[in-house]
Image (tube, rainbow, N blue to C red):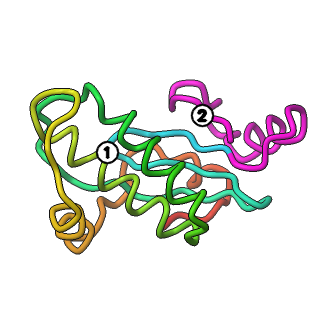
Amino acid sequence: MGCVRGGGVPRGRAAQFFRSWSEVHGIQTICVTLGSKGCAVLHGGRFECFHGYKIRVADTVGAGDAFAAAFLHDLHVGWPMDRVVSFANALGALVAGKDGATPPWDLDECRRLMAQGTNDLNAYSPCRETGGETR
C-alpha cells in the first residue's frame, strides 16, 4: 500500500497519477488523505473518492496516524473498501476533533459519527475532474 498526502496529487489527473504509481512501483492499494474532504483510493484497479466527516477541529496532530492505522487494520481484516474508508475517515475525524495526538475514543463514538453521514465534496475532489466515482 502507498500513502501520499493530498498535496502530492496533480490536480485533474489523480486517477492517472494513482494508476501510474501502482504500475511503476507494484503497489496494489494507494490512499491519499484529503483532510475534511475525505480520501481518494486506488484498490484492485478501481479509483474512488470517499467523503470525510464534518467535525469541529480541535487538534489535527495524530489524525492522519489514526486514519492510517484504521485503514491498514481494516484492509488487512478484509473489509470491503467502502467500510474500510468509512471507519478510517471517521476515526481520523474523531481524533482531529479532540485535543492531543492520542485522545481517548471508543467504537460507539466512531459509529455515532459514521451514522451522522459524511460531508459532500463541494470543494476540490480528484474524482470530480477525472470521472472517478465519489461516495
Using a 10 Å C-alpha cutoff, classify the residue at mark 2 as few (fewer than 14 neighbours), some (14 to 19) or many (20 or more).
few
Q: In the figure, residue 65 lies in which quadrant? A: top left
Q: In terms of image quadrants, where is residue 26?
A: top right
Q: Give above or below for 119 relative to 38.
A: below
Whether 20 is among the magenta residues is yes
Instruction: Note whether 81 is above or below 69 in the view shown.
Output: below
Name the residue rendered at 44%, 40% in the picture: 34
The kind of residue on which mark 1 rests is: Gly
Q: Position of residue 57 (x, y in %)?
A: 15, 37
Q: Which mark is residue 3?
A: 2
Q: Where's the N terminus, which quadrant?
A: top right
Q: Position of residue 110 (x, y in %)?
A: 23, 61
Task: Tell me if residue 27 is in the magenta stretch.
Answer: yes
Secondary-structure class at tag 2: strand
For marks 1 and 2 on the same chain, the one whose residue lies earlier in the sequence:
2
In this view, the residue in front, 126 or 27, is: 27
Q: Amino acid at mark 2?
A: Cys
Residue 110 - label: none
Segment colored magenta: 1-29
Residue indicated by mark 1: 92
